[in-house]
Image: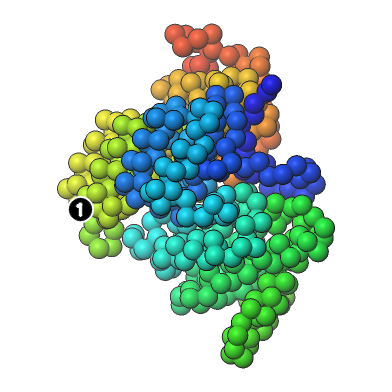
Amino acid sequence: MSHVSPTCDPAAGSSGSSRGADRSRPDACPGALQVHQAADGGLARVRVPGGVVAAEQLRALAAVAAELGDGHLELTSRANIQLRGLGSGTEPRLAERIAAVGLLPSRTHERVRNILASPLSGRDGVGAWDVAPLVADLDRELCARPELAELSGRFLFTLDDGRGDVAGLDGDVGALAVESGRAAMWLAGQDIGLRVPAAEVVAVMLAAASAFLAERAAQDSRAWRITELTDGVARVRDRLATEFGHAQSTHAQSMHAQSMHAQSMHAQSGELAPSPVVSPHPHGPVGLIEQQDGLVTLAVVVPLGRLSAQQAEALADAALDGGGELRTTPWRGIVVRDLPPAAARHWSSTMDSHGLVVDPASPWVGVSACAGRPGCGKAMADVRADASRWTRLAARATADGLPVHWVGCGRRCGRPRGRVVEVVATGAGYEVTRDGRVLAELAVPAGPGTTGDIEETAAAVDAARRDQ
């Protein structure tokens, strides 16, 4: 039997619509309770809304991974945390352990708590206003609405503080902070013209999710995402303007909903200025970042998103010198905020000694990979091992260099949004591609002790990253 590692976004990295995708089967996106059986054992995905995880929660997950899985935690492109290599029958113990530390607040909604938020929001002064407080509100209200348990595990909410870091990451329902404490509302990556006060953002986002479900039912569709509906953005937007008004209990609130509808119409006619243009960031924050309050944020890259128990312990210790929390990022990194400057310098050195990346010019910055062999039965190569060998020979990263994504087959699971250099295993070797064009075809290295072919691969990938 072939075991294939699942992807929570079959269209990830595609610039087109995912309409026409096969949705005849139930959504198999893994969760903490719905464990996927991969080639290397069970795979569980723990949702971490906004990437926020307490130090003790990270320790608990690392302990569970060591006792029940392969000893590692994996960071996903939606800032969630995966455990692999779970033994058969461990699901009840896994659920019990993560529930005990507050990581399973709802058994019915656990797979739909997909919320991305700007990880530096409220700290470095770059965003329009701080969206971090909205994460817990959105998560709580999402879990409180029974009908929203019908969303798929692929449906994604984004809260962007105005810097444009997560608004371009393929969200279904998004809020982008703009001036005067308001937010521009987005559907499927498009600004739909609605501008709402910060206090109403959560209600409007949940109304949009409900509007998606209503439109899905009206179309007799099994769509998992807004782009899979016929005219999805336009129809969900129109339902949102109407249905949000029906959810209000006072005349004044109803009038506000009418105003929202009017703004939407003005936006279509060009009368309303669009929100800032955003594009997918090639990588997230890296290194020491000064905060407005004099404290420091430490942002690390986790090579290939794979975190050992020892690394997790070090990060948890660092967080206790700050606010006691960490934030996982959609670029497979971790941010520790609110550190005193001396502690930040100490922990930066410590993370480097633990194999975590704190240098913005490290070749690891912007590099990702699918599971590859042995975790996925479809993979044609151990892409993580080959990516690691390549990185040891690669040139230092530059601010404008493209991300690099290694994949074990043509399915290209986990591909980042935007322009990417892809290194695709073919069975006979690797193809280096960019913008749909094959730039080089290379033989598979003979083994860990050889360097000839991997040097050729490194040169080809480095050239593709920079020659844009």
Residue 404 picture location, percent across and down: 53, 34
Residue 338 picture location, percent across and down: 27, 55
Q: On the picture, is 422 further left or further right than 11? A: left
Q: Amino acid at mark 1?
A: Pro
Give the image quarter of residue 361.
top left
Q: Residue at x 54, y 61 (%)?
A: 143
Q: Where is mark 1, residue-wise?
A: 340
Colour theme: rainbow
Q: Which quadrant is home to the C terminus?
A: top right
Which of 286/156 is in front? 156
Can you see residue 269?
A: yes
Q: Secondary structure at mark 1?
A: loop
Q: Residue at x 60, y 13 (%)?
A: 443
Density class for disc 1 (Cα within 10 Å; few <14, some 14-19, many ≥20) is some
Q: Residue at x 74, y 65 (%)?
A: 214
How many numbered marks have been drawn onto this rendered protein structure? 1
Q: Residue at x 54, y 65 (%)?
A: 144
Q: On the picture, is 105 further left or further right than 14? A: left
Which of 39/359 is in front? 39
Q: Which quadrant is home to the N terminus?
A: top right
